[in-house]
Image (cartoon, rainbow, N blue to C red):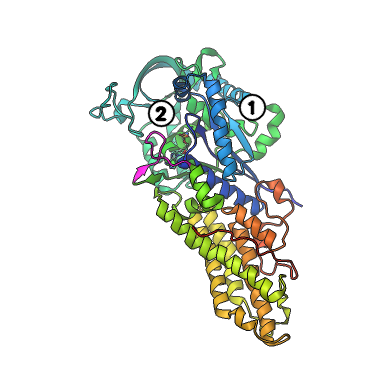
């Protein structure tokens, strides 16, 4: 078998200042669905996620909880791994910025930029947002808007929380030097940043002029020490961005082959609030270090609760565990990918979630499976019937035709990161199968006597619907991994597990798998419990 092509995708690494919420889970679920899709599509996937553990924000969270930063991150890290387990997140690798290999990689890259003169000493004086770990130039601030509380400081233009004044000796990265180069790069690589609105935003930001960036902190102890000046720790964003290369062996001679196979990444998923870091600073860092740039960076929007960004600090963030409990893992994943358009902000609500669950999952998809599996037992002895004796060779063509066009539609939708469109396309087949059963009325055909043309047609009708179910289970597996695995088991097929390239084994790629006629006649069918019990 020829070697599978690499597909490397990443999520942002999450701050360990509080437990994960729906917003952080959103990026991870979307990335997971894509990772699973690419595995099914025949790629050798490396899906990376992890934790951003250094910096002032984490240091202060630890102090507030009377423990050391090390104790704090170790105490909180399991909340993330546990949630990813509950949500069936199939990351192939897990990075923590306190991993010694990561810290070494950070030092290697920093030293290189220091040696080439891209990092130089200077003095920083200005405003800093601790929750965002971001510097702000005076010109970005509205000096009339002040904190109503005790600090009287100007507010962060991004998150609206009071800024802090910082004045310290530190080191700078020559970001300004790369301004023209960056603009040229965006121009020559129109797909580098998506969606279009974010690309435009980044371009106009860079056109507005770049200043050199302070990349070390003298007063923050919780971080990676600079190799040439141990009184400074690395600015947390500089440290964190490097996770994308440290996780695949950057700077480690023994892992050179792995690094060249995996890097550059195919895709970085980010939220729209962190595009400057990913689309401006990160490419400049890589270019300065003579490393290739990721193929694409895609920014999704925010989940809004009653019109406001859902966040820990606003106290409007629902705990994912509650929703998993009610809707199940698949119900949870389905809702966020189907109902919220990826790339723009999306309001979420309990009513919408119940509606999607009951309508699409319980009524359409779950019900199709249970009525069909029941009919297979009632009319065909519980096995996949043989369609060969049906006089009409065109029986089931309505389903075969929808199925035939599906791969191209779904693949295009995944390539565009349009999850809702992918699911909508698949639902065309779900709905067609339900309609087909209504119209061909197997319960009437079953009344005809043994050996009749109606009985032969019945076998072909049920075969066609069962085959549609097999194909739907394959296409929905990236979003509904548990239900798909279950449907495969009930159809007597070998396991469908796209949680890792190895788990998929020698399964042919999705396009081939979804070709009509793959369901073996005679397979035993299990009725089982409803896949999505109505709420
Ligand atoms: N640690 C940095 C990322 C470093 S990557 C080298 C960070 N962490 S974060 O935990 O604050 O946020 C991580 C991601 O969660 C961001 O992409 C952010 O957009 C996303 N979300 C946080 N709240 C969100 C919503 N309410 N809705 C959707 N996503 C949001 O930033």
Residue at figure coordinates x 74%, y 53% from the top left: 506
Q: Residues within 10 Å of mark 1 (few under 14, many from 20)?
A: some
Camera-side residue: 249 or 419?
419
Q: Residue furthest left?
A: 144
User: Residue 18 magenta-drawn?
Assistant: no
Is residue 40 visible to the viewer in this orientation of the structure?
yes
Per the picture, the main secondary structure of the magenta-coloured stretch is loop
Q: Earlier in the sequence, mark 2 or mark 1?
A: 2
The vertical placement of 502 against 130, above or below, is below
Rendered image quadrant of residue 480: bottom right
The vertical placement of 481 against 407, above or below, is above
Camera-side residue: 249 or 319?
319
User: Residue 309 magenta-drawn?
Assistant: yes
Residue at figure coordinates x 46%, y 58% from the top left: 356
- Residue 90 is situated, as x and y percent measured from the top left of the image, at 62, 44
Residue 131: numbered disc: 2
- Magenta highlight range: 307-319
Q: Secondary structure at mark 1?
A: loop
Q: Calculate the distance from the C-alpha at mark 2 to the C-alpha at mark 1.
A: 30 Å
- Residue 166 is situated, as x and y percent measured from the top left of the image, at 37, 18
Camera-side residue: 12 or 522?
522
How many numbered marks does the figure carry? 2
Q: 400 left or right of 122?
A: right
- Residue 140 is situated, as x and y percent measured from the top left of the image, at 31, 30
Q: Secondary structure at mark 2?
A: loop
* Label 2 within 8 A of ligand 1 by Cβ: no
Q: 505 left or right of 398?
A: right
The vertical placement of 123 against 75, above or below, is above
Residue 251: numbered disc: 1
Is residue 242 visible to the viewer in this orientation of the structure?
no
Q: 143 left or right of 285?
A: left
Q: 448 left or right of 78?
A: right
């Amino acid at each position: 078998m020829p070697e599978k092509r690499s597909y490397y995708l990443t999520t942002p690494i999450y701050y360990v200042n509080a437990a994960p919420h729906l917003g952080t889970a959103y990026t991870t679920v979307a990335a997971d669905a894509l990772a699973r899709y690419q595995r099914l599509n025949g790629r050798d996937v490396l899906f990376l996620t992890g934790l951003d553990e250094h910096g002032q924000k984490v240091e202060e969270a630890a102090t507030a909880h009377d423990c050391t930063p090390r104790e704090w991150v170790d105490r909180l890290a399991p909340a993330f791994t546990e949630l990813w387990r509950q949500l069936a997140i199939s990351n192939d690798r897990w990075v923590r910025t306190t991993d010694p290999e990561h810290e070494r990689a950070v030092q290697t890259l920093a030293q290189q930029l220091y040696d080439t003169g891209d990092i130089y000493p200077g003095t920083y004086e200005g405003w800093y947002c601790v929750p965002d770990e971001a510097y702000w130039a005076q010109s970005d601030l509205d000096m009339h808007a002040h904190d109503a509380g005790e600090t009287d400081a100007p507010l962060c233009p991004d998150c609206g929380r009071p800024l802090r004044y910082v004045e310290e000796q530190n080191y700078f990265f020559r970001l300004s030097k790369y301004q023209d180069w960056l603009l040229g790069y965006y121009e020559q690589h129109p797909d580098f940043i998506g969606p279009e609105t974010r690309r435009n935003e980044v371009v106009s930001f860079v056109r507005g002029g770049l200043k050199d960036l302070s990349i070390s902190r003298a007063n923050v102890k919780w971080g990676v020490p600079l190799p040439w000046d141990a009184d400074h720790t690395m600015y947390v964003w500089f440290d964190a961005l490097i996770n994308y290369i440290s996780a695949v062996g950057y700077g480690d001679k023994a892992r050179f082959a792995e690094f060249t196979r995996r890097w550059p990444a195919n895709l970085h998923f980010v939220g729209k609030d962190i595009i400057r870091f990913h689309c401006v600073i990160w490419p400049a860092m890589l270019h300065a270090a003579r490393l290739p740039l990721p193929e694409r960076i895609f920014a999704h929007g925010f989940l809004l609760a009653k019109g406001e960004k859902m966040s820990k600090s606003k106290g409007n963030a629902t705990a994912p565990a509650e929703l998993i409990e009610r809707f199940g893992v698949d119900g949870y994943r389905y809702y966020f990918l189907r109902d919220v358009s990826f790339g723009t902000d999306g309001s979420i609500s309990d009513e919408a979630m119940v509606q999607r669950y009951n309508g699409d999952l319980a009524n359409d998809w779950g019900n199709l499976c249970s009525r069909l599996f029941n009919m297979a037992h009632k009319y065909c002895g519980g096995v996949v019937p043989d369609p060969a004796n049906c006089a009409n060779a065109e029986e089931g063509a309505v389903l075969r035709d929808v199925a035939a066009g599906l791969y191209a539609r779904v693949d295009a939708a995944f390539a565009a990161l349009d999850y809702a469109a992918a699911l909508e396309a698949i639902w065309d087949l779900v709905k067609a199968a339900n309609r087909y059963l209504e119209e061909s009325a197997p319960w009437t055909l079953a009344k005809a006597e043994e050996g009749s043309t109606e009985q032969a047609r019945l076998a072909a009708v049920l075969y066609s619907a069962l085959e549609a179910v097999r194909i739907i289970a394959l296409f929905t597996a990236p979003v509904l991994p548990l239900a798909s695995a279950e449907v495969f088991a009930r159809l007597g097929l070998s396991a469908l597990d796209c949680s890792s390239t190895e788990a998929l084994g020698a399964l042919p790629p999705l396009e081939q798998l979804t070709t009509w006629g793959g369901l073996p006649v005679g397979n035993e069918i299990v009725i089982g419990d409803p896949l999505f019990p109505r709420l």
